[in-house]
Image: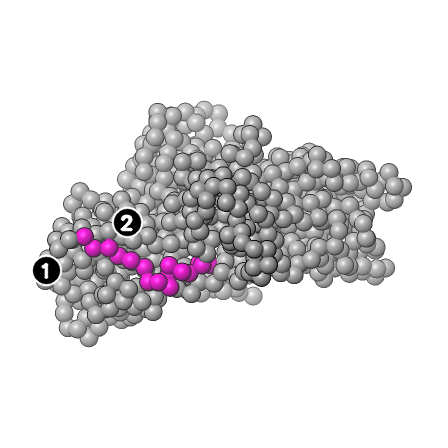
Amino acid sequence: MKTFCGRANPTTGAMEWLEEDENYDYHQEIARSRYADMLHDKDRNVKYYEGIRAAVNRVKERGEKAIVLDIGTGTGLLSMMAASAGADFCYAVEVFKPMANAAVKIVEKNGFRDKIKVINKHSTEVTVGPDGDMQCRANILVTELFDTELIGEGALPTYEHAHKYLVQEGCEAVPYRATVYVQLVESKRMWSWNKLFPIHVEAEDGEKIIVSPSEMEDCPGVPSVCDIQLNQMPSSDFTVLSDVVTMFSVDFSKPVRSASTSYRVQLEPVKSGKAQIVLSWWDIDMDPSGMINCTMAPYWVKSTSTFQWRDHWMQCVYFLPNEEPVLQGEKVYLTACRDEYSVWYKVQKARGEEENKAAVHVESPVCRCQAHLLWNRPRFGQLNDQNRTCQYIKSLMKVLKTDSVCLCISDGSLLPVLAHYLGAKQLLIKTVCYFFFFKFFKANNLEDKIKIIEARPELLTSSHLEDKKISVLVGEPFFTTSLLPWHNLYFWYARTAVTSHLTSNVTVLPQSASLHMMIVEFQDLWRIRSPCGTCEGFDVQTMDDMINNSMNFRESKEAEPHPLWEYPCKSLSDPQEVLTFDFRKTVPEYSLSTEGSVNLLRKGKSHGAVLWMEYHLAAGISVNTGLMQISNEKGNCEWNPHCKQAVYFFSSVTESETLLDLPSAVTYAINFNTKTGEIAMDFKL
């Protein structure tokens, strides 16, 4: 049986369905999973083990048999902890078949075959009774069903069903409870991920300001949570407006309700400002007394001595529907609404009790302006980056003439508006989301100045261009289907497709691009790809082998995208330019390849190579999507916060190879296949 998988084609800028081997899909899921990250989370594992031991002891002290139900068992780790702690029997439920098969092997390898039964089902399909999956209801419920938002993986409906059908009344639960905390802040940086700020353009006839349509100003955005490593957000990038308060908690030992509901707390602002953002995180108590606690609190809330890095649970950024001015000491109400899978927030002034009660229900945010569907959060940040915009303005001023006929090829780009204000005679934009751009141009009185073309570049005709030839072709370039930095080279393919419509002396902006690379040591990110071996004394090598097997199925020779501003690393080499792409010429028929070596200048573990693109807009003007600077002699790196960089992990990470000597150089071979638009790479330490 074959399976069809969606993959972005960098040569067409489109999502295409490719026929893959039937195993491809699950190999992808395993290779990209966070299982290794969870197994490396020492704090989580130790706390779970302590909580499970305590729960088993409480049941035994009552003279009962300890029967455990472990939902979402993964490797079987928590069931093995329970069996080791003296549980009489464990039912380990895992819906993902390859994972359930691995759990069976791991349980057997660790000698718990008689104590643990792995059930490959969704927990809502598990049956209880003499002929059922479980002989009887469990009296200890153990789960790890949480994501950064706590409830995004369906924890609530799963618990609700388990209490109704799979566990005894008054059962023990590990974790025992979860508590969600919130803090109100003002942050221009985070707010710039959700709203488009006015853009100022100095034109020959005075300053012009690009504004958003009113629908965009009033739009609450999209409901999906923004989960980030808040520990990498400097305190100078936000202003705290309230103390940390408890928003709600869930007691997992009692019946849980998943139906939509809301919670409300009164806050007294500690500072006046604009309430824009709700920062949120949770903690879990593994026992009723709250003595065994595992918290996601960020650095300014808890001491760093207890800091545990993890990538499977981070912190949440919620954007309020509109910014609300708050005054120090003047109380406000913060309302949290949730459905089964997500949470959203609203701030209201504390007025009369009745008036506030009536206004509690808050609609789930739905984007009505289309901008939040077209631009993701990093893209909003990129469009709001005034320094970046200045580079485009400077380069457009260099290349535009009063008779320029300008075509822009980029998704959701504001370059045509800049070009109009800087004097281009005629402007055409090839973009997605026609209605949004029509409204955007109208808000800036440009609806009759910029023509929107919906045809694909290869289908462009003279009539689309009103029988004119393009004298300036521009792009940022940015395309929504791009996953890796070089996927935006689709601009080159689009430029090639429209060659017949270009004047002989056409100006292309950017005129070229270059691929850059640097060898780094990560502070923590390496853990997501590092084998675990043993975890809390249990052999989980089978899991390591399974991930490696899946990596080798396709992934091991591929880089993966990561926003490196969230993942500190230090450079071990100088950055190096490895390939260049000349947009003034068409895409060549032959592949572009390079090989060489890069010297390691600093001592450290070579975890991998980071790759990024730089776009050369015009002579002496470029924009960089990767390394902004190496900030000190230790080699600490600052990365472009609006783009994901490509990370290629070395086998010394993925296979835990021990290198006898620290390597002095890394050799590389990089090949850009012009037929597929993909880059293959290989590195040797």
Say which mark, if any, is on residue 592. 2
User: In this rendering, does residue 459 appear at all?
Assistant: yes
The chosen color scheme is: one colour
- In reply to whether residue 214 is colored magenta, the answer given is yes
- As helix, strand or loop, the secondary structure at mark 2 comes to strand
Q: Residue 409, relative to residue 327: is it above or below?
A: below
Upstream in the sequence, badge 2 or badge 1?
1
Asked if residue 559 lies left or right of residue 578, the reply is right
Alpha carbons under labels 2 and 1: distance apart: 37 Å
Give the farthest residue toward the bottom.
463
Residue beneath the point at 21% across and 52% down: 201
Residue assigned mark 1:
402
Say which mark, if any, is on residue 462. none
Residue 308 screen position, x and y as percent? 56, 34
- In reply to whether residue 616 is colored magenta, the answer given is no
> Which stretch appears magenta?
207-222
Q: Callout 2, which amino acid?
A: Leu
Q: Callout 1, which amino acid?
A: Thr
- As helix, strand or loop, the secondary structure at mark 1 comes to loop
Seen from the viewer's position, the closer of residues 356 and 9 is 356
